[in-house]
Amino acid sequence: MKQAPVYFENAFAQLNEFIQTHSDKKIMFLVDENTHEYCLPILLAELPEIQDMEIIEIPSGEDSKSIEIATQVWISLSELGADRNSIIINCGGGVVTDFGGFVASTFKRGVKFINVPTSLLSMVDASVGAKTGINLNHLKNQIGTFTQPEMVVINPDFLLTLPDKEMLSGFAEMLKHGLIQDVNHWKQLKKISALNPENLAPLIQASVEIKKAVVEQDPTEKGLRKILNAGHTIGHALETYYLDHQIQFTHGEAVALGLILESYIAVMKKQLSLNDFEEIKSVIDKFYTKVDLPKAEQILPLLMHDKKNVGKEIQCVLLDKIGFCNPEPVNISIAEVDLAFDFYRNN
Ligand SMILES: NC(=O)c1ccc[n+]([C@@H]2O[C@H](COP(=O)([O-])OP(=O)(O)OC[C@H]3O[C@@H](n4cnc5c(N)ncnc54)[C@H](O)[C@@H]3O)[C@@H](O)[C@H]2O)c1
């Protein structure tokens, strides 16, 4: 399935051109309070052609991906006069692009939307691939659609105001892209000395191209797209565990930790070499602070909930080597997870 165009060079000019050809349509901007303050003014300054626009703000954070907030936004759209021809521009991190895509794809049976990602994670991951969604109680992304935006507009300058911990969060997905598909991308990333927009900007496009190529081949996750879940089986379970225990832990920190733990399991299964594992661990250790792990059995119910599981087995995609992930999920046991946790605690 053809993916929406992702613009880097002259990205704002592309958006401006789109707006000019839709000058009779109402444009609805969706932001959270941070992107309203830091990003929307930059974006609006680049779009002088807009004639009819409204701004809808949602609270920042994962809790906004709820049916209650979606209902409020549907009502606001309706009250502000949005119709089937209106265009929603999601200007924000992954919460805004996931949520905004969902709201747009369901309002009046679907209106056009554009993603303008402003966090590193949404640039390299969330805004590309057509997955939209909200959460159901504590379970992430349970309700959603596969809907393509009209375009994705990437400008790394937005990262100048992004907090460091959010930069680290997106960087984990970039590392994952290198590990699963492209050893050269990995080599570039591991050379980075500090995570700042200047160092990262030249590598964002390569990361997006990797994700885009994977989802183009397998848009609905029947096979190859599963490799994007590397590090996510254990990572997601830990992310939920820490959130449930009011411990601040970003998605990317969880993915980075998951990549170490799942790679260790790949070594135990003789799928990945020890050399490659040690390289992966040393690069991740360079950027991410060590954390206290719970007992493996404490995350077992969360592991059992993973979307890749079949029946009662925990399933996981594992690396064969740096630059190649096997898309065929393998069963992992709680004993293997336990051994990986022990290794991490002691090293
Ligand atoms: N659809 C997908 O394929 C996909 C893939 C990965 C993640 N996701 C989703 O993405 C979400 C996480 O995205 P995220 O990490 O971007 O979180 P987020 O949207 O909550 O953004 C993180 C924080 O950074 C702030 N922020 C964003 N851009 C900023 C900027 N330029 N300057 C200052 N502050 C800024 C936000 O207000 C927020 O406080 C999760 O809900 C996850 O499920 C979706």
Image (cartoon, rainbow, N blue to C red):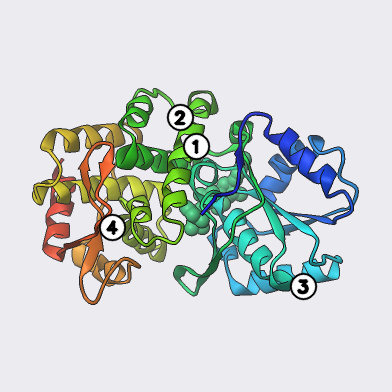
Q: Residues within 10 Å of mark 1 (few under 14, many from 20)?
A: few
The quarter of the rendered structure image containing the C terminus is top left
Question: Would you say the beta carbon of the disc 3 residue lies within 8 angstroms of ligand 1?
Answer: no
Whichever of labels 1 and 4 marks the residue nearer the N terminus, that label is: 1
Residue 184 x, y percent position in the rendering: 34, 28
Q: Which residue is mark 4?
A: 234
Whichever of labels 3 and 2 marks the residue nearer the N terminus, that label is: 3
Badge 1 vs badge 2, beta-carbon distance below 8 Å = yes
Q: Which residue is mark 3?
A: 75
Q: Which residue is mark 2?
A: 195
- Total label count? 4
Residue 56 x, y percent position in the rendering: 76, 58
Residue 289 in view: no
Whichever of labels 1 and 2 marks the residue nearer the N terminus, that label is: 1
Whichever of labels 1 and 3 marks the residue nearer the N terminus, that label is: 3
Q: Residues within 10 Å of mark 3 (few under 14, many from 20)?
A: some
- Tell me the kind of residue under disc 3: Ile
- Tell me the kind of residue under disc 1: Asp
- Residue at mark 3 to residue at mark 2: CA–CA distance: 40 Å
Residue drawn at 78 percent across, 39 percent down: 16
Badge 3 vs badge 4, beta-carbon distance below 8 Å = no
Whichever of labels 4 and 2 marks the residue nearer the N terminus, that label is: 2
Residue drawn at 63 percent across, 35 percent down: 158
Question: Mark 2: which secondary structure?
Answer: loop
Q: Residue 330: which quarter of the image?
A: bottom left
- Tell me the kind of residue under disc 4: Ile
Whichever of labels 3 and 4 marks the residue nearer the N terminus, that label is: 3
Residue 72 x, y percent position in the rendering: 72, 71
Question: Mark 1: which secondary structure?
Answer: helix
